[in-house]
Amino acid sequence: MPSIAAYDLNEFVERAVFLKDRPAFALADGTVHLPAGGERVLTAHQGGLLAAEYDPFSERLLTGGEDGRLVAISGDGHMRELASIGRKWITAVAGGPGGAAGFASGRIAYAMKPDGTVFETPHERSVEGLAFAPKGFRCAIARYDGASVFFPGTNAAPQWLEWKGAHLAIAFSPDGKFLVTAMQENALHGWRLSDGKHMRMTGYPSKVKDWSWSAKGKFLATTGAPAAILWPFTGKDGPMGKAPLELGTRGDAMVTAVACHPAEDMLAVGYQDGMVLAVRFADAKEALLRRPGASPVRTLAWDKGGQRLAFGTEDGSAGVIDIAG
């Protein structure tokens, strides 16, 4: 059985990440806990945290809150305010290539170049999610009735990608060829960016609230079912006409968090009852990493070496699982 270093944080854990191989936990109350080498608590936001995402381009944690601040926490635990928009809530954040960053408040998407220049792009409806393309200063936002792709600070017309319904989260595929949104209904929707071709990913019994791209972008793993649902993104058509993998199936608990291993075809799966499993893609072989607890797993994250897994739950239980034991 793997060993677990457990932490009781007494607050909803919104995001677990590794910063230079040290675990960090962003909590709903606006604090960020760095437990390794002696407990450190950073107050990132007054009033509460509304968004927290790992920025893989710059290996930092980005957070937004009710205080209208965009904050970055680096690998050495240094906290820096990147932007402030007063008393407006920041509800989505994202990292981009070369140190770029983005955030959203209401109907405005903000994109910040590495030199600190901020561009505001207004939209007709609320901006629900934000993502950067893998290369270049190119953004996409999730909104009502679809998504928009644009180049901040330019006069280039945005690419409008329409699909009826509320789109709440958004992600580019690692190769930049596809764009995927999680919807208010129990579904994902996607587009092939070269021609706007639609990709429907349906059949979920509940909303998709977490997702993770596998190593080299072969699969997109998602929550929203009693198994982790992995859509294949190999080939020019992405998942169209292909059945998804279903891993870690349990009849009595929904999957609430997923994290693909950084190098291997393996997935960590967190469940509504607090259990965490590791599952291999090839043969669906499972390994128990954490026994059921009292609260749903909200977030999972691997370290760079793929030997340790951080987790956080809705009731504030958190920890680091060493899979080597």
Image (cartoon, rainbow, N blue to C red):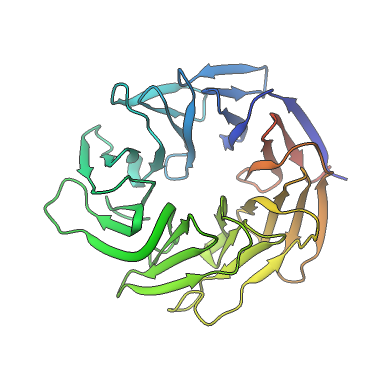
**View extreme (right): residue:** 1
When asked about the image quadrant of residue 122, the answer is top left
Report the side of 162 relative to 53 (left or right): left
As drawn, 325 above or below 211: above
**View extreme (left): residue:** 155
Q: Is 69 in front, or is 168? A: 168
As drawn, 318 above or below 197: above
| The C terminus sits in image quarter | top right
Residue 311 percent across, percent down from the top left? 68, 39
Report the side of 192 relative to 246 (left or right): left
Q: Is 216 in front, or is 212? A: 212
When asked about the image quadrant of residue 299, the answer is top right
Q: Residue at x 40, y 40 (%)?
A: 92
Residue 29 percent across, percent down from the top left? 55, 23
Q: Is 115 in front, or is 224? A: 224
| The N terminus sits in image quarter | top right
Q: Residue at x 40, y 39 (%)?
A: 93
Residue 257 percent across, percent down from the top left? 64, 49
Q: Residue at x 42, y 45 (%)?
A: 57
As drawn, 199 above or below 146: below
Q: How many marks?
A: 0
Report the side of 216 relative to 314 (left or right): left
Residue 149 percent across, percent down from the top left? 28, 57
When asked about the image quadrant of residue 215, the answer is bottom right
